[in-house]
Amino acid sequence: MTTPALLQTTAAPLGPRQTAQLAASGLVLIAVAYGLARFAYGLFVPAFRAEFGLDPGVVGLIGSSSYVAYCLAIYPAMMLTPRLGSRTMVVITGTLATLGTALVGLAPHAAVLAVGVVLGGMSTGLASPPLAHAVSARVAWPHRDRVQTIINAGTGLGVAVSGPVALVTLAHWRSAWLIFAAVALLATLWAAQSVPHARLARPGAERQGTGERLRSLLPDPLLPDGALRLHATAVLMGAATAAVWVFGQDVLTGSGGQSQFTATVAWSGLGLCGLLGAAVGDIAHRVGMRVAWGGSAVLIALATAVIGLLPGQVGLTAAACGAFGAVYIAMSGLILISAAATYCEQPAAGVGVAFLMLALGQSIGGSLVGGLLEGLGAAPAFTAAAGVALISAVLAPRHLASSQVR
């Protein structure tokens, strides 16, 4: 076994102002990559179905392609972040998000729409590892977990923004996606100025051959203590939450008969409540990982079941969407800080592997839920997803945060 790489840089920790800029620009970049380029797809499913004549199976397939692209982009993010540095990788992330959202807005047919969705999915695969790497390398120790979870909450911000934009543009969904592209471009420029050029210092790296360099960038060990539990948890959580992310809007307006306005308001509430997930690190330190994770999984199950079983109840489904948003961001934040702790010497790789497992679960879940929706309807499909969430309740990740394994 080779000696594990030590996460070290010659630069001093960032000052308070620079740390705040990193947290803010990272949050906005995550908002663009996850909330706009990836998860906004579910918000516009009714418009896409009407424009391109898509059936639920094709909707699920296109949605799942985003998760597949995410999976394919994770490994390059893990491999290249220590070599190229965090700043270079976030610029690539933002560029892909800009191109993907622009293609969706300009799509003449479903094939181009799918390409745009795939590029958006790739941007999410590249986003988290370099930001986690930058935080671990350059943020002072007492503030790392808080900054990590603040950045992770950007998904909620992106979803919250996409809702009002959709309402303002009404049937002009193309304008909405072109606005998303402009926002993505601005976020990329900000990140290029605010994210430090953190790299991994490896003694003797310049003397390694190409094969040795590639192997050395993999986690070592690949499965440290607690990793299997962490990855199983991430897969289950991804599969359980795909129902709402991919089909939530379509179920509210289709099966539930809600207006596009009320469904979009509920979706925006999902995003706004997601910002509450930024506090998950502090909460988990107080109550423990097992309690925080188990309670969150039960709430995810309840919210998913309400949306699938009672899609016509405006008040209940709005509350369920809000709860889902807050708890999803909290659970993904717990996965992030647990991954950074489990792979404490290579946090970019650890976060990449964990989020790969999360996306893999979402890809599987999106396809299965799409098939169930087409064959059986919303209630059985969403109930099945809620059941998977309950199963994940007993598999809390072992490590709470990086401070526990210092």
Image: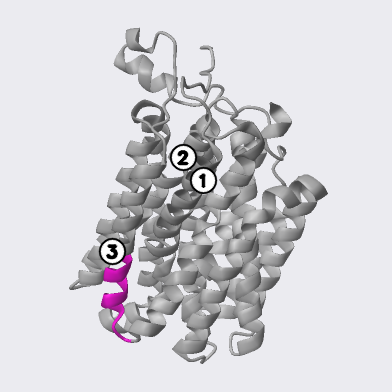
Q: Which mark is residue 355?
A: 1
The quadrant the C terminus occupies is: top right
| Viewer-nearest residue: 235 or 128 | 128
User: Left or right of 334: which side holds 168?
Assistant: left
Q: Is residue 392 above or below residue 387?
A: above
Cβ atoms at labels 1 and 2 below 8 Å apart? yes
- Label 1 Cα neighbours within 10 Å, binned few <14 / some 14-19 / many ≥20: many
Question: Which residue is at the front of the view, 20 or 55?
Answer: 20
Q: Where is residue 173 drawn, in percent x and y?
A: 31, 79
Magenta stretch: dominant SS?
A: helix
Determine the image quadrant of residue 388. bottom right
Which residue position holds label 2?
129
Assign a secondary structure to mark 2.
Answer: helix
SS state under label 1: helix
Q: Earlier in the sequence, mark 2 or mark 3?
A: 2
**Residue at (36, 31) in percent of width and height:** 80
Q: Comparing marks 1 and 3, which lies closer to the viewer?
A: 3
Q: Position of residue 127 (x, y in %)?
A: 42, 46
> Over which residues does the magenta segment extend?
171-181
At x 28%, y 64%, the residue is: 182
Q: Nearer the viewer, mark 1 or mark 2?
A: 2
Q: Amino acid at mark 2?
A: Pro
Q: Indicate the amino acid at tag 1.
A: Phe
